[in-house]
Image: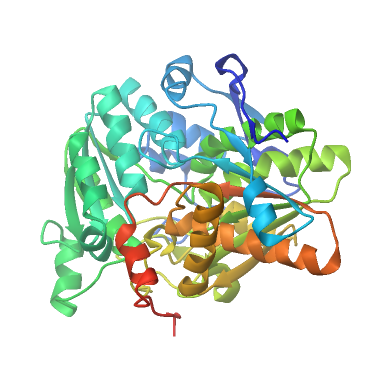
Amino acid sequence: MKRVFNLTQGELPRRWYNVLADFDNPLPPPLDPRTKEPLDPDALKALFAEECVAQEVSTDRFIDIPEEVLEVYRLWRPTPLFRAVNLERALETPARIYYKYEGTSPTGSHKPNTAVAQAYYHRVEGTRCLTTETGAGQWGSALSFACHVFGLNCTVYMVRVSYEQKPYRRVMMQIYGAEVIPSPSERTEAGRTILVADPDSTGSLGIAISEAIETALREPATKYSLGSVLNHVLLHQTVVGEEALLQLDMAGDYPDVVVGCVGGGSNFAGLMLPFLRDSRARGRAVEFVAVEPVACPTITRGEVRYDYGDTAEMTPLLKMHTLGHGFVPPPIHAGGLRYHGVAPIVTRLVEEGVVKAVSLDQVNVFEGAVLFAQAEGIVPAPESAHAVRTAIDIARECRETGQEKVILIGLSGHGHFDMSAYADYLAGKLVSISST
């Protein structure tokens, strides 16, 4: 039985897929944080590269990937698609389980797919430094890598609890030349305000975003880069799903269920959006499952309304599922999923019934992650482990019902820098944490 399905570099997708072209109605427009009126896209150029702003509002179905970006992608792309034969046997399930593994990138996750594109566009336009935030450190390390490739400086505000929990991700950023600052910090007015109110604040992505944006607006030749949520970020991640479509065709299979973890939504959307387009064209029914932590249940318990993307109310307001921009999640190990909002594209698909959302407790998540590691030999990142656990639950249901579903997992990164989390789980110290 063939286990791995991989493309050659010559088959690397050369276009990103833009789902906005296929929406019947446009997304609600972002609102200006000062006037609360629809935002002129040109206003975003104060923070983002002009080409990223153009992609943010584009309705072209496909957008060409620049050759310079493809050249960097070829360091690790295409990434492999595996059939999880050993996991299937361990579960005694008739389901066929595949996983698209993004952990082979230079920084170990899917994040460089957009980091490289954004750094390239900024370099072309003369930006000298990029600022950003990071939770678990996957995005921060990806942007640090991309900035190094294109000769840009990089400043990363890392959520304090992750800064302390995951020191080796911080070291990886520093290896690529980035300055890494625990957030909230004394560096910015936004950080100082939080520390006055709560000197022991563990931080949040919302706070770190505020600090990064404040720095970008203050420093010359400096702009801001975001690793999830916005349309152009999800666009860049569709290279994952485009590859997976070709690879599953090589395997002679097609998914009944596509499962991915969701923080801001870019990893999940990058995998599922090309399958959404393709399944509709084929007239096939596919179930898309978004998995989030019960400690930060943005989709499953949040409201759909306009909200800021950051704590200090500096970003445009987006119509999205949100727990409120002041929400500070508990310090669970899946730092990349600790965000109060979600991509408006994902919100639209949930509202339309295309995407189903579930939330999981971290103890159950790590139980599934250990089983997967023992069967497949890959230790998943705590974020990816949410998708793994849900796929295991679906496969067990198939064992009970006899259904032969094909399940595709988005394994968005490895857990090599998350051993403290696994140590806590194996020692019985990992606790169940909810958002209430």
Q: Is residue 136 above or below residue 171?
A: below
- Where 319 sits versus 194, above or below? above
Query: Horizontal and vertical percent for residue 40?
Result: 47, 44
Q: Residue 134: image x %, image y %?
A: 32, 52
Quadrant location, the C terminus = bottom left
Residue at point 63%, 31% (across, down): 243
**Residue closest to the eye, 428 or 250:** 428
Near-viewer residue (247 or 62): 247
Residue at image coords 74%, 57%? 354
Answer above or below: position of 344 versus 365.
above
Q: Is residue 412 left or right of residue 431?
A: right
Q: Position of residue 148 (x, y in %)?
A: 25, 28
**Residue sitting at the far right:** 283
Quarter-wise, where is residue 7 in the image? Answer: top right
Q: Give the image quarter of residue 350.
A: bottom right
Residue drawn where x is 57% and y is 57% of the image: 388
Relative to residue 93, is residue 118 drawn left or right? left
Q: How many marks?
A: 0
Image location of residue 174, percent across then percent down: 18, 40
The quarter of the rendered structure image containing the N terminus is top right
